[in-house]
Image (tube, helix red, strand yellow):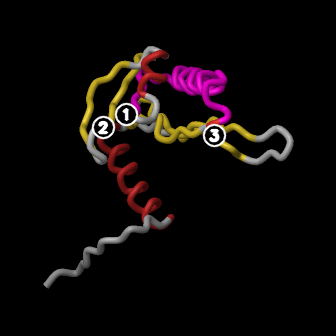
Amino acid sequence: MTKHTVEITNEITEEMSEIIGAGLNAYNDEITKYNDRKSLAIVVRDKQSGQLIGGMLGRSSLGLLFIELVYLPEELRNSGLGSTILKQFEQEGRNRGCSAAVLYTISFQAPGFYEKHGWERFGEIPCSPPGTSRIFLTKKL
């Protein structure tokens, strides 16, 4: 008889993230004897209200920079703000000693934006709806 249960859920709680993340981080640290992981956020706020309206989230770990989430409201797209944020994110990666960066985007999102900034595709996987794909990109820093 087993001492454990396995559950499926659609909700990721803070407790789940903390326990699973801490366990994985401890394992990685033990194996690599190296710990440089650090979160990174570049945020955009409304100048008058101070309200958070967009930005870029990610992290650095084991000498790599990861871009995980990016969002700007439609009225701020194509204004140069996205390029500014991306350049700042990349520079912070360099400052942290990262040699390369990775991300994935969806074909209807912004692959051309990243390619315009020197990012290169290294993989693509079809997903739903038909004609859509996840595009994986990298850039040497």
Residue 90 shows in the view = yes
Q: Position of residue 136 (x, y in %)?
A: 33, 31
Give, as a single range, the part of the protein colored magenta. 75-104
Q: Residue furthest bottom?
A: 1
Cβ atoms at labels 2 and 1 below 8 Å apart? yes
Q: Position of residue 6 (x, y in %)?
A: 26, 74
Disc 2 marks a residue whose amino acid type is Ser
In the rendered image, which residue does mark 1 sit on? Answer: 107
In the rendered image, which residue does mark 3 sit on? Answer: 73
Q: Is residue 67 above or below residue 8?
A: above
Residue 72 numbered mark, or none: none
Crowd tier of the residue under label 1, counting other residues whose Cα lies within 10 Å: few below 14, some 14–19, many 20 or above:
some
Closer to the chain start, of discs 2 and 1, is: 1
Crowd tier of the residue under label 2, counting other residues whose Cα lies within 10 Å: few below 14, some 14–19, many 20 or above:
some
Q: Is residue 8 above or below residue 90?
A: below
User: Mark 2: which secondary structure?
Assistant: strand
On whether residue 98 falls in the magenta region, the answer is: yes
In the rendered image, which residue does mark 2 sit on? Answer: 133
Q: Position of residue 68 (x, y in %)?
A: 46, 40
Which of 39/8 is in front? 8
Closer to the chain start, of discs 2 and 3, is: 3
Disc 1 marks a residue whose amino acid type is Ser
* C-alpha gap between disc 2 and disc 3: 23 Å
In this image, 104 relative to 70: left or right?
Answer: left
